[in-house]
Image (tube, coloured by chain):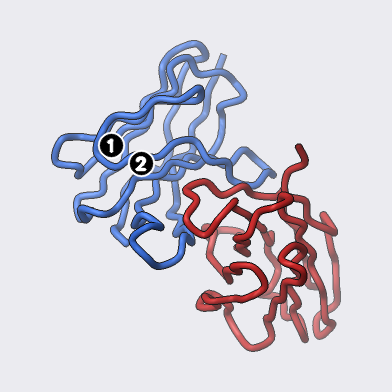
Chain colours: A red, B blue
């Protein structure tokens, strides 16, 4: 079946603009995660959704970052007033339930802020 | 979550077994050992996980020492496509409460050569 998909695959934006990144999890998966991977840094957790609720937002780096999930499916990560340090690959993952061991990752969105 | 230590890089000849070590000396009794890998320009991929018994699946084997302070991921017959960064992650069972977010370290960059 289809895996996790993310769009766009690449996004170049000017500093100060807002961007929206989209994640389509595997159908039926209730848990959804956002991570980011910066050059020279490892993968860092951003936010976790169970259904449409986000019980763990501890990884969001600033209030310029927000995310929502609707219908227990698609999620959007929004970055307002982008800064150059926001440049990274943003990865989305989903798992079947909150207690699943395995997370399935999408291919990521490469964000470049100029 | 317990901290893990992995060598930054390893080499392996194609067709030979790749043995990737991980040290997790502060692991707690309810923490599992997970392995993920990330092939260049792709999202991470789940490989295997275990608590205290050795585990094997179609991708790899996981050997955990009796004191659980270290483990080894074994790729029995490495191919060029196994070239990737391999992450060893220690995490409480999702059934123990808390969320299943993954905390990635720097990993081991495995290069499989002909």
Q: Residue at x 82, y 75 (%)?
A: A19
Residue A47 on image: x %, y %: 58, 71
Q: Residue at x 76, y 60 (%)?
A: A23
Label of residue A24 in the image: none
Residue A87 sits in which quadrant? bottom right
Q: Residue at x 34, y 45 (%)?
A: B33
Q: Secondary structure at mark 1?
A: strand
As drawn, B15 above or below B69: above
Confirm whether residue A38 shows in the render.
no
Q: Residue at x 30, y 57 (%)?
A: B3
Query: Label 1 lies in what chain?
Result: B
Residue A97 on image: x %, y %: 55, 55
Whole-number angstrom distance, CA of label 2 to CA of label 1: 13 Å
> Given the current orientation, which residue lies at the most extreme left position?
B67
Q: Which residue is mark 1?
A: B71
Split into 4 quadrants, where in the image is the C terminus of chain A? bottom right
Q: How crowded is the residue under tag 1: few (<14 C-alpha within 10 Å), some, or many (20+)?
A: many
Residue B70 sits in which quadrant? top left
Label of residue B7 in the image: 2
As drawn, B29 above or below A81: above
Q: Earlier in the sequence, mark 2 or mark 1?
A: 2
Front of the two marks 2 and 1:
1
Q: Nearer the viewer, residue A111 or A93?
A: A93
Q: Are marks 2 and 1 on the same chain?
A: yes
As drawn, A29 above or below B9: below
Split into 4 quadrants, where in the image is the N terminus of chain A? top right
């Amino acid at each position: 079946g289809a895996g996790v998909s993310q769009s766009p695959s690449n996004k170049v934006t000017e500093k100060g603009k807002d961007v929206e990144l989209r994640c389509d999890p595997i159908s039926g998966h209730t848990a959804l995660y956002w991570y980011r991977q910066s050059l020279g840094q490892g993968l860092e957790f951003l936010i976790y959704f169970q259904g449409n609720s986000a019980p763990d937002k501890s990884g969001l780096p600033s209030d310029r970052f927000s995310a929502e999930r609707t219908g227990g499916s698609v999620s959007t990560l929004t970055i307002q007033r982008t800064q150059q340090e926001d440049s990274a690959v943003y990865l989305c993952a989903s798992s079947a339930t909150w207690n699943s061991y395995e997370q399935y990752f999408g291919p990521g969105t490469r964000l470049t802020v100029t | 979550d317990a901290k893990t230590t992995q060598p930054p890089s390893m080499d392996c000849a194609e067709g030979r077994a790749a043995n990737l070590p991980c040290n997790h000396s502060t692991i707690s009794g309810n923490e599992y050992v997970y392995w993920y890998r990330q092939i260049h320009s792709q999202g991470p991929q789940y490989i295997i996980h275990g608590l205290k018994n050795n585990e094997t699946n179609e991708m790899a084997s996981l050997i955990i020492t009796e004191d659980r302070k270290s483990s080894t991921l074994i790729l029995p017959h490495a191919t060029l496509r196994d070239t990737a960064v391999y992450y060893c992650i220690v995490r409480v069972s999702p059934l123990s409460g808390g969320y299943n977010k993954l905390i990635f370290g720097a990993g081991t960059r495995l290069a499989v050569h002909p």
